[in-house]
Image (cartoon, rainbow, N blue to C red):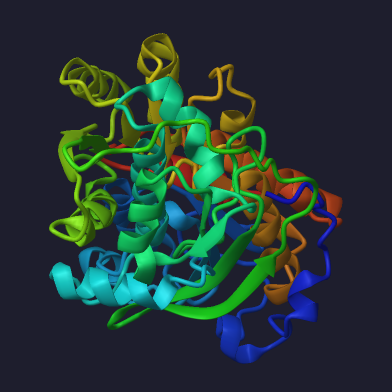
Amino acid sequence: MSRDYNRRAFLKRTGAVGTVGLLGGLAGCSTGGTGGGGETPDVLMVVGYPQSGVQLFKDFYADYGDDDANILVTDGLQSGDLPGDVGNDMSNVRGTAPTSSGPGRETFESLFLEEFDYDQAGVFTSQAYDASAVQILANLMAGENDGTSIRDHMRVVANPGGTTYTPSELPEAAEAAAAGENIQYEGASSNVNFDDAGDITSARYQVFGFTGDGVETRETVDFGGSGEIPEPEPAGSGSGADRTVRLGVLQPETGDLGPLGVAIRDAALLPAIQLRDAIDQTVETQVGDTQSQAQAGIDAANSLVSAGFPSITGPAGSETTIQVARNVLVDNQVVGCSPSATSPDITDLEDDDFVFRTPPSDALQGRVLAQVATENLEGTTASTLYLNNSYGQALQQSFVNAFEDAGGSVSQQVSFESQQPSYTSQINTAMSI
């Protein structure tokens, strides 16, 4: 991912600023609803997950309504079911999330919607597809179900230096990787070039809103990569026809992230389905449920490792990813490639290079959010209401830093726990100046 974050005018350059259509003409407000009875911040930035989000927004609208409230949310709340579950059209809510920019985006979406029963490809599904595709290709090139060998070939199959293949050519890419040829997989979510920390080197974000039919993209913003991209050479023996490639999938099928995690899980399984009967080798998968909790994620990861899976697509949440890396992946020399863990803390993990991810770091998304808050919503004051874990803490702090750098003032930074019975107290604190 680009380290150049001096992007304070990027929305203007892409035509995403100053339009009534983008953010519904919402301007900064100085008086709120009935909950606080006094001045409220111009913008409330909320970081959370869908199940908690239902109760949180029910409590918010019960006290504050929606006429005078500008709310920004993040990718964790990008669920098309949210307005229906909340009982409000949520027209005053906008958000940002990583989105697809790779050359294989349309191919992936077509394959995904044909294979599974979804109306649209959800958030982080293309990143999940790419994470699994890269691991399968690295395994085929390595020639063995060995985490260290797969790790050493992740950048070989993804970064520049070889023959280019996209998702429509995944069977051909697999055959070339099995033959030990140098390849460059360019994916659905991005070009999937990994830097030395295992982060991708470019990103695209969408600014979205809620509609009666789900989630609607209003604008997209591209960030090109910068700096040197490692270009290692193949070192594995390749794969014969009688090999079985093993890939674990570790996602939140239940719990707070369950409404998003099931689709992410299915997208992670799609490359193996696509390759079935298309290559000489067999791709075996096994799924583990993190239940949206770190300890359950550790337990499920240990089960996958014990079953002999040398690499895993997942986990999804940042806190679970960090804990699984520290307690399972590194000690067992197993690769983890998360499609949706975005905390900046993951970049600096002491992971012996076993942790990769296909979405960009929230060090960037916080700046995108701040840009929307200041430029589109004309906000000069803001508060944050965030899930108390690695994802929520880091993303809200990234927003706070960028918002204050732009001249804004942050009134309150309020944390909450997952799946509380009520969020009224936290909301009232966040909405006070």
* Residue 398 or residue 167, whichever sits in front: 167
Between residue 385 and residue 32, name the one nearer to us.
Answer: 385
Left or right: 159 as drawn, with respect to 306? right
Q: Is residue 155 above or below residue 369?
A: above
Q: Position of residue 416 (x, y in %)?
A: 43, 35
Q: Residue at x 22, y 74 (%)?
A: 113
Q: Is residue 321 visible?
A: no
| 379 or 177, nearer to the observer | 177
- Numbered-mark total: 0
Q: Residue at x 24, y 26 (%)?
A: 309
> For this view, does 431 lie left or right of residue 144?
right
Residue 328 image position (x, y, % from top left): 35, 15
Residue 402 drawn above or below residue 155: below
Based on the displayed image, in which of its 4 quarters is residue 245 positioned? top left
Using the image as rendered, state which of residue 328 and residue 342 is in the foreground: 328
- Please state the horizontal and vertical placement of residue 116, each as a whole percent of the image: 15, 67
Q: Residue at x 80, y 79 (%)?
A: 13
**Can you see residue 330?**
yes
Q: Position of residue 420 (x, y in %)?
A: 29, 37
Q: Residue at x 29, y 19 (%)?
A: 298
Q: Quadrant of residue 220?
A: bottom right
